[in-house]
Image (cartoon, rainbow, N blue to C red):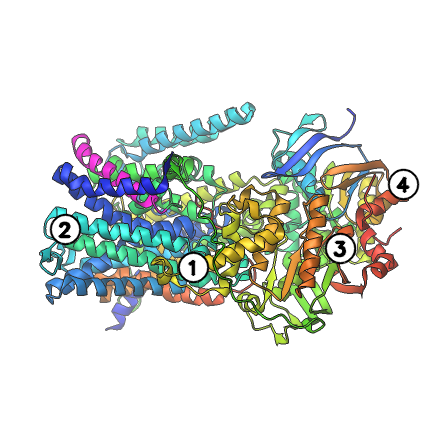
């Protein structure tokens, strides 16, 4: 094997790892705040890719109808909760956040869909359209069960994946898409190795966003409030931090990261309505490496998964999924030896 | 009593089929320290958690004239109604400074206010200033209690509910903590103090209730209660008439 | 109301008669129901009863199907040999996955079974000998001597024989020693450890059983359809099995068949209907099932079984008073040292919860441990029983250093406890809760229990439990649910369970809390009687009247340290103790 190939595989792996890193950060964030393993974030990434592709081919993306329908249902659910709890004064607030805000990008999307508009506007509209999806999914399916065990929440998250992936087929159709690269062209590294600019972009975006993530949680009070909710839920409530709002913020950030993942990956990989599952699961392997708790270890784990994937697809492409998922095993063995003896575990109540 | 800052009437709290609090009436005067004392297991913590909105309850409860039954924990906090729970509920994996800053979460937008609050908390608890970069979980028991109170003070509450601030603390530290509680009252904060350490609580309080197996069995001016033999009896046996 | 036996008999007769009266397609459909029931049966044990979750059940089915498929076609072996290897391979896979995930938090098992299920699916689709994505054809039918299970009707009977036998096995198992451990899993590791059960092993075993049941289903499936491809072994199908379990009622064995029937029928109906409505029937079916699962979890978490159970009258099995007794241990002579706590320390981060505490407890005495809230009494209890490990110092129980012993081993030595926050299974009867306490005194394993060969021992254990209930005065309510007792009586029930361990030392954490005056007197009388019988008792209690009149000696703890030790009268008069309780500031 020549040095060139090693270098190419490494760069390919780093750029794939960058994708898993972004998705993995979202995983850890949502899990630490809500105890939900948010598998559907992969679907959200796929929908972002399909939405952008639809805009590029001058068609109305199906996600507009999906988001609008979800917003209507979520708004209805929220209003009914307020009426039942006797907090009718919050109705305008609920309508604004659950109906008006998500509908704005839907309308913009309808207006620009068939027009010749700058690429940047398409990307921004796609982002804005996809951004509320996590929050809406949470409001409709997970929040009503927020006090249930991790197990129930996980089953629901998986069911939601199958639900929205199925709907994805209906609204997007079965065809795979590739979007136009955001950055065209190639860069030649010293030594003559040619790297697509899109891959460089993926790495830069991941680095940049990791840094923003770090600043957000280290410096901003909103970020600290999210960490506080993860650290001690009762304590956070006693400070006036509303858990449902913390959850909504976490879902918003995770959806945003997923949308970026979808937009970055679509020019290099063909995306189908159900491609999200694999992205989500592989990113979750990175998050498992980080114990669903540590951001830095998740980042390292995700990059490792990316590099492993590029090597596996080069050496044994038929078995690459098997190789990647097998990585979980040593990680789990290591973790299971690290479990200490003290403390009673959570009692899982199913029935 | 209509002029009470907090009034509880016929409050019941149940865990499943077990009633831990049975028909309690309490009125808390503005600017006073009101204490609820009683042996372990009397239902004091349950009462306080219910008043703060952490447990479901039935009965009538008003704070500043507003009905509490529709208010969440967070609604109460926004109105200056703060609980320092028995377990302290600190953010153990975060530094002391962040714990304090989050104490002012409901007034986070007013940067000058947060800064002033922080300075005043550091002034009252210089130890916290020394340890501001340390993680909360590395603090000793007394420091944790100071951090819990300091964090609650960051929002400059009008009513502070303190659950067993003396719990697990050595006598000298208990004295120190309770001295500060009195200092808070002098700054105008109304306080509901739940304590097992009866003498210490009666020493600082203005008005006192004695709780036994879910009910209030005695009430009166704290000064009168301190010498009442029936208080002793609820602790070390002998029964209350 | 129909008695449960008649109801079951009726169901079996209906299954028997079905091929005679129903059209062939329904017989085939019911064969599929039987196969699915087996998988779901495993999920009921695993999820509904054990509180675990797996998304890998379809993959287990697949492993078994491919094993037998390959052995019978490529090597031409008998399907019965195929069965042996299929079950061995599924059991081994389950054992391996369980061993590495079941010590971890609840979400690691489902997450790793997804990853594993996908890997297996890709493996099936990529291995040349397994026919890649096109699958394997011409799998031979099962034969037994001259009988061939080639026809759908014959296969129907074979499948349902297996399914009904497996159901019976599971019902027997749940009503046995290991089955009780399984039903206690959701009570948490501390409860199980206190009566000598091993949480991890119990979990692992039930996961393996669920795997074997799925393996059996896979073997039947391969020889029924006689053609296999990777599709029925996808993760998506695991979700369908889960949906079946939830629809039927995940905590009831019979729910497996109810749920499987319903979902297979709905699926069949959707497959007829959807192609008329859409070009993507498979995906719409997926949407429908996912939606159903979400709605069931939200609105009807106990599934359909509660409705079925309303029709059925179930009589509690009476206790056989003629049964023999369980062996009893010899108690140490009065005055011998039972427990030595020597300079024990326990730190939590910066907190010292227990600080260099030493005391002894001698055989045949009742020692009270008192002190204000937060003094470290419960921590002390947890250190003695092995629930927590000591930071420094030693605890010796019957002369043995317990530092390296687990909670279970300490319980096995004869240390039984109750909990400050009651740990019972509210949906189990008083009797069943107490029989759990005899775990260490009985031996029956899974196979013996499933085949009902454990009855003699089981009857002894039940009699023992009834006697303990009688001892604490709860015998009349033996068949009521533990959750229906008032909290105070639940504490007494915990004492009965602790006594069923036949302990040397009984450790009671606030046993009198929530009891009325008369009940407290009865409890005190019981504890005195137990002491007179040679039992040693260590007790934490806040009701001073109760403690002072009961115990022989008192140890007072304050701020994690021992303040005083002495007889009740001296302690009550001690100014330092009064100060500790009432505060020393005045």
Q: Are the residues under badges 3 and 1 in a single subunit?
A: yes
Q: Are the residues under badges 3 and 2 in a single subunit?
A: yes
Q: Give the image location of residue A153, x and y in percent.
A: 43, 45
Q: Give the image location of residue B139, x and y in percent.
A: 68, 59
**B144 horizontally vs A169: left or right:** right
Q: Are the residues under badges 2 and 4 in a single subunit?
A: no
In this rendered view, identify the residue nearer to me: A335 or A281.
Answer: A335
Q: Is residue C553 magenta?
A: no
How far apart marks 3 and 1 lie (CA) works out to: 37 Å
Specify whether residue C376 is in view: yes
Badge 3: few (under 14), some or many (20 or more) residues near its Cα, within 10 Å?
many
In this rendered view, identify the residue nearer to me: B146 or A51.
Answer: B146
Q: Which residue is mark 4?
A: B223
Nearer the observer: mark 3 or 2; the answer is 3
Report helix, strand or loop for mark 3.
Answer: helix
Task: Assign the C terminus of chain A to one quadrant of the image.
Answer: top left
In this rendered view, identify the residue nearer to me: C118 or C269.
Answer: C269
């Amino acid at each position: 094997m020549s040095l060139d190939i090693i270098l190419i595989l490494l760069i390919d792996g780093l750029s794939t790892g960058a994708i898993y890193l972004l998705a993995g950060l979202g995983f850890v964030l949502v899990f630490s705040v809500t105890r939900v393993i948010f598998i559907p974030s992969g679907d959200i990434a796929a929908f972002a890719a399909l939405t952008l592709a639809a805009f590029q081919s001058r068609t109305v993306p199906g996600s507009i109808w999906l988001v609008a329908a979800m917003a209507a249902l979520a708004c209805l659910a929220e209003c009914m909760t307020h009426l039942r709890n006797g907090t009718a004064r919050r109705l305008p607030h609920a309508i604004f956040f659950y109906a008006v805000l998500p509908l704005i990008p839907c309308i913009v999307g309808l207006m620009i869909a068939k027009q010749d508009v700058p690429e940047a506007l398409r990307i921004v509209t796609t982002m804005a359209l996809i951004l509320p999806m996590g929050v809406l999914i949470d409001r409709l399916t997970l929040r009503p069960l927020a006090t249930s065990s991790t197990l129930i929440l996980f089953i629901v998250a998986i069911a939601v994946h199958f639900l929205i992936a199925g709907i994805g087929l209906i609204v997007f159709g079965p065809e795979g898409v590739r979007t136009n690269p955001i950055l065209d062209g190639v860069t030649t590294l010293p030594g003559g190795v040619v790297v697509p600019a899109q891959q460089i972009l993926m790495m830069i975006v991941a680095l940049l966003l990791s840094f923003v993530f770090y600043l957000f949680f280290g410096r901003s009070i909103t970020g600290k409030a999210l960490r506080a909710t993860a650290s001690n839920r009762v304590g956070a409530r006693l400070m006036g931090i509303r858990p449902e709002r913390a959850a909504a913020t976490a879902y918003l950030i995770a959806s945003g990261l997923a949308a970026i993942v979808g937009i970055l990956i679509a020019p290099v990989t063909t995306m189908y309505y159900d491609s999200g599952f694999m992205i989500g699961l592989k990113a979750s392997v990175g998050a498992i490496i980080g114990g669903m708790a540590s951001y830095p270890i998740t980042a390292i784990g995700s990059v490792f998964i990316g590099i492993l994937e590029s090597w596996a697809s080069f050496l044994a492409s038929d078995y690459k999924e098997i190789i990647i998922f097998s990585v979980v095993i040593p990680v789990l063995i290591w973790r299971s030896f690290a479990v200490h003896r003290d403390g009673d575990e959570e009692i899982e109540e199913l029935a | 009593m209509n002029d009470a800052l907090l009034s509880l009437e016929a409050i019941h709290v149940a865990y499943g089929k077990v009633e831990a609090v049975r028909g309690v009436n309490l009125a808390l005067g503005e600017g006073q320290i009101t204490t609820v004392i009683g042996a372990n297991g009397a239902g004091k913590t349950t009462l306080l958690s219910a008043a703060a909105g952490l447990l479901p309850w039935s009965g009538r409860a008003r704070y500043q004239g507003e009905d509490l039954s529709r208010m969440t924990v967070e609604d109460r906090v926004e109105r200056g109604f703060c609980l320092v729970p028995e377990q302290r509920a600190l953010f153990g994996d975060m530094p002391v400074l962040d714990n304090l800053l989050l104490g002012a979460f409901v007034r986070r937008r007013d940067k000058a206010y947060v800064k002033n609050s922080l300075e005043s908390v550091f002034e009252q608890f210089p130890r916290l200033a020394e340890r501001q970069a340390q993680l909360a979980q590395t603090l000793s028991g007394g420091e944790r209690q100071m951090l819990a109170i300091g964090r609650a003070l960051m929002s400059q509450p009008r009513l502070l509910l303190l659950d067993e601030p003396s719990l697990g603390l050595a006598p000298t530290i208990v004295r120190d903590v309770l001295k500060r509680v009195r200092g808070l009252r002098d700054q105008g904060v109304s306080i509901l103090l739940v304590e097992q350490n009866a003498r210490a609580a009666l020493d600082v309080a203005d008005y006192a209730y004695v709780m036994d197996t879910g009910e209030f069995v005695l009430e009166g001016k704290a000064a009168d209660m301190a010498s009442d033999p029936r208080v002793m009896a609820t602790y070390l046996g002998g029964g209350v008439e | 109301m129909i008695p449960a036996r008649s109801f079951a008999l009726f169901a079996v007769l209906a299954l028997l008669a079905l091929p005679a009266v129903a059209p062939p397609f329904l017989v085939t459909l019911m064969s599929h129901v039987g196969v699915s029931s087996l998988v779901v049966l495993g999920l009921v044990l695993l999820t509904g009863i054990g509180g675990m979750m797996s998304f890998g059940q379809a993959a287990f089915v697949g492993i078994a199907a491919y094993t037998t498929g390959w052995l019978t076609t490529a090597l031409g072996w008998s399907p019965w040999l195929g069965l042996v290897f299929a079950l061995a391979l599924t059991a081994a896979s389950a054992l391996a996955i369980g061993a590495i995930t079941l010590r971890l938090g609840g979400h690691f098992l489902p997450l790793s079974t997804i990853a594993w299920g996908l890997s297996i699916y890709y493996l099936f689709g990529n291995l040349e000998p397994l026919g890649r994505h096109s699958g394997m054809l011409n799998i031979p039918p099962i034969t037994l001597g001259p009988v061939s299970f080639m026809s759908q009707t014959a296969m129907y009977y074979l499948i349902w024989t297996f399914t009904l036998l497996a159901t019976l096995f599971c019902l027997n198992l749940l009503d046995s020693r290991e089955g009780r451990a399984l039903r206690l899993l959701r009570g948490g590791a501390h409860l199980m450890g206190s009566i000598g059960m091993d949480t991890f092993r119990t979990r692992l075993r039930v996961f393996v059983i669920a795997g074997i049941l799925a393996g059996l289903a896979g073997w039947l499936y391969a020889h029924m359809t006689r053609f296999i491809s990777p599709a029925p072994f996808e993760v998506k199908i695991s979700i369908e099995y889960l949906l079946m379990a939830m629809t039927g009622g995940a905590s009831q064995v019979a729910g497996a068949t109810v749920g499987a029937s319903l979902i297979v029928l709905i699926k069949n109906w959707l497959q007829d209907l959807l192609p008329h409505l859409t070009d993507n029937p498979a995906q719409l079916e997926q949407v429908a099932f996912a939606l159903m699962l979400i709605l069931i979890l939200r609105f009807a978490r106990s599934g359909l079984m509660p409705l079925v159970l309303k029709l059925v009258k179930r009589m509690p099995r009476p206790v056989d008073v003629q049964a023999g007794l369980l062996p009893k241990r010899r108690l140490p002579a009065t005055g011998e040292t039972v427990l030595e706590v020597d300079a024990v320390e326990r730190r939590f981060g910066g907190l010292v919860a227990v600080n260099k505490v030493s005391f002894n407890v001698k055989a045949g005495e009742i020692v009270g441990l008192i002190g204000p809230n937060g003094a470290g009494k419960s921590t002390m209890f947890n250190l003695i029983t092995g629930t927590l490990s000591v930071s420094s110092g030693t605890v010796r129980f019957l002369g043995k250093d317990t530092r390296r012993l687990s909670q279970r081993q300490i319980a096995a030595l004869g240390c039984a406890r109750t909990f400050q926050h009651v740990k019972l299974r509210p949906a189990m009867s008083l009797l069943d809760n107490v029989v759990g306490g005899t775990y260490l005194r009985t031996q029956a394993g899974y196979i013996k229990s499933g085949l009902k060969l454990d009855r003699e021992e089981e009857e002894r254990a039940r009699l023992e439990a009834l006697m303990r209930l009688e001892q604490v005065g709860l015998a009349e309510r033996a068949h009521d649910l533990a959750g229906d007792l008032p909290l105070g009586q639940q504490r007494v029930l915990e004492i009965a369970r602790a006594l069923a361990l036949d302990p040397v030392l009984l450790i009671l954490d606030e046993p009198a809390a929530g009891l009325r005056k008369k009940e407290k007197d009865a409890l005190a009388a019981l504890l005195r009687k137990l002491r007179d019988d040679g039992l040693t008792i260590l007790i934490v209690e806040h009701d001073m009247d109760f403690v002072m009149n009961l115990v022989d000696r008192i140890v007072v703890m304050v701020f994690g340290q021992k303040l005083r030790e002495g007889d009740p009268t001296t302690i009550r008069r001690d100014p330092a103790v009064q100060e500790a309780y009432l505060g020393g500031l005045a």
